[in-house]
Structure formats: C-alpha cells, structure tokens
C-alpha cells in the first residue's frame, strides 16, 4: 500500500517538472524570438537610413556643383560684358581724341592765314578772327542735311569738331554755353563756348557744306559769357 502511494507521488512530481520545463523552454524560445525580431528590425532600419543618406548625398553634391557652375558662368558673363563695355568706351574716346587732334593740327597749320580785327558784332566782342583757308571738318552723314541740336547726335559732335578746329579749344576742356541755329543764314549755326576756367571765351559761326560737313566762317573772342 505504501509502495503504491510513493510510486504515484514520484510520478506526479516528474510530470510537474516536465510541465515546468516545457513552460520555461517555451518562454525562453519566445524571448529569443522577440530578441531576434527586434534586432532584425533595428538592423534593417539602420541599413535603410544609410542607403537613404548615401542616395541623397550625391544629389546634394550635384546640386551644389550646378549652383557653383552657374555662379562661375554668371561671373564670367558679367566680367565679359564689363570688358566689352570698357573696350567700346575706350574706342569711342580714342576716336573723339583723334578727331580733336586732327582738328587742332588743321587749326595750327592755318594760323598764318587768319585775319584778326578788333571788335565785332557787339560790344562784348574783343576781336574777330576769320580765316579764308578754313575747310569743312568732314562728316559721316549722308543724304539731305538738317541741323540737329541734340548733344547725343552725330551732327552735334561734328559741330563741336568744327568749333575745336576754329578755336583750338580741346573738347575735354570745353564748356558749351549755347549751340543753335544762325537764323541769318541757311544751314548755319552759332556756338558760344569757353574753356572750363573761362579764360578763353568764343562765339563761333559755322555753316554746313553738303557732303563735306561743318566749316567755321568766323570766330569772335568774347569779354564775358552772357
């Protein structure tokens, strides 16, 4: 009787231990599975972030390179345009300077032929200068001529060339007080000019010669600019 009870008790204990071990093993497997799952997610997520960063980096660098290239091209274009503007301005100044020098040389060469008389058309005139050898200064204009009194026009510049030719006054040192029509003569103009320090003051009469440009006819040296 006692032997049967002991055998039954031992069998029950072994069954309980087996159940306990089974539960523990199951829990261990579940925990391991969770650890593996979490580790896998972390690993995969980390790779995705790295791949995303790797893909975006070249795009960022490419955009930066494009921006730098655009800036470089813009800077080069600006410098090229500025260089062209300076070159054009220098060419224009050189041409004007050459024209003035040519006019001055003509005036100097013809000084021996000039006729000077005291007084003139008004009491403000100190003396009058005329020269039979004065010639037209040349022109780039073609067709029928009509005087243009606009400081930005070719006609205006050619009138100043004639004034420089007659007076020897350099245009860089010239103040134009008046330049307009001489109503007493067809296709003729009158200019009142002075040096910038007003030490030289002139009233210059010029007329248009078809195909040849403006030609001085008379210069009056003035006492004052009125």
Image: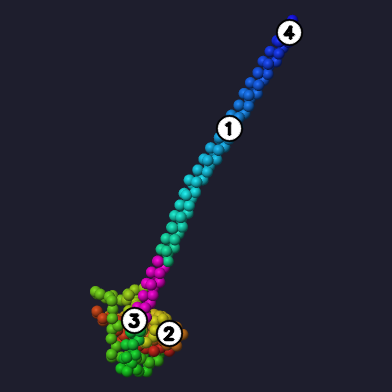
Residue 150 in sight in this render:
no
The reply, left or right, for residue 15 in relation to residue 142 is: right
Residue lying furthest right: 2
User: From mark 3 to mark 1, how far is it between C-alphas?
Assistant: 94 Å
Residue 23 lies in the magenta-colored region: no
Q: Which of marks 2 and 4 is nearer the N terminus?
A: 4
Counting from the top left corner in percent of width and height, residue 144 is at 24, 74
Q: Which of marks 3 and 4 is nearer the N terminus?
A: 4
The residue that mark 2 highlights is 195
At numbered mark 4, what does the secondary structure look like: helix, strand or loop?
A: helix
| Residue 70 in which image quadrant | bottom left
In the picture, measured across the screen, residue 184 lies left or right of residue 10, that is left
Q: Residue furthest top?
A: 1
Q: Residue furthest front?
A: 3
For residue 42, say whether it is visible.
Answer: yes
Of pointers 3 and 1, the one earlier in the residue sequence: 1
109, 20: nearer the viewer = 20
Mark 4 against mark 1, which lies toward the viewer?
4
Q: Which dot, 3 or 2, sits closer to the camera?
A: 3
Indicate the position of residue 159 as horizontal and vertical percent values. Answer: 33, 80
Q: Cα distance, mark 2 to mark 1?
A: 99 Å
- Per the rendered image, the range of residues in magenta is 80-99
Name the residue carrying label 3: 99
Residue 94: say if magenta: yes
């Amino acid at each position: 009787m006692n032997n049967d009870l002991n055998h039954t008790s031992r069998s029950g204990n072994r069954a309980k231990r087996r159940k306990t071990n089974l539960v523990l093993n199951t829990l261990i497997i579940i925990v391991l599975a969770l650890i593996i799952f979490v580790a896998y997610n972390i690993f995969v997520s980390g790779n995705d972030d790295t791949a995303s960063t790797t893909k975006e980096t070249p795009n960022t660098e490419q955009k930066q390179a494009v921006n730098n290239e655009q800036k470089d091209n813009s800077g080069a274009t600006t410098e090229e345009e500025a260089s062209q503007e300076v070159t054009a301005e220098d060419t224009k100044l050189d041409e004007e300077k050459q024209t003035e020098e040519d006019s001055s040389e003509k005036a100097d060469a013809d000084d021996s032929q000039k006729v000077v008389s005291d007084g003139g058309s008004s009491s403000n005139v100190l003396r009058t200068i005329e020269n039979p050898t004065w010639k037209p200064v040349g022109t780039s204009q073609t067709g029928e001529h009509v005087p243009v009194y606009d400081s930005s026009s070719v006609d205006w510049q050619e009138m100043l060339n004639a004034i420089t030719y007659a007076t020897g006054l350099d245009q860089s040192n010239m103040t134009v007080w008046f330049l307009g029509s001489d109503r007493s003569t067809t296709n003729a103009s009158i200019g009142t000019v002075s040096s910038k320090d007003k030490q030289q003051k002139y009233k210059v009469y010029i007329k248009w010669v078809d195909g040849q440009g403006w030609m001085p006819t008379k210069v009056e040296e003035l006492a004052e600019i009125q």
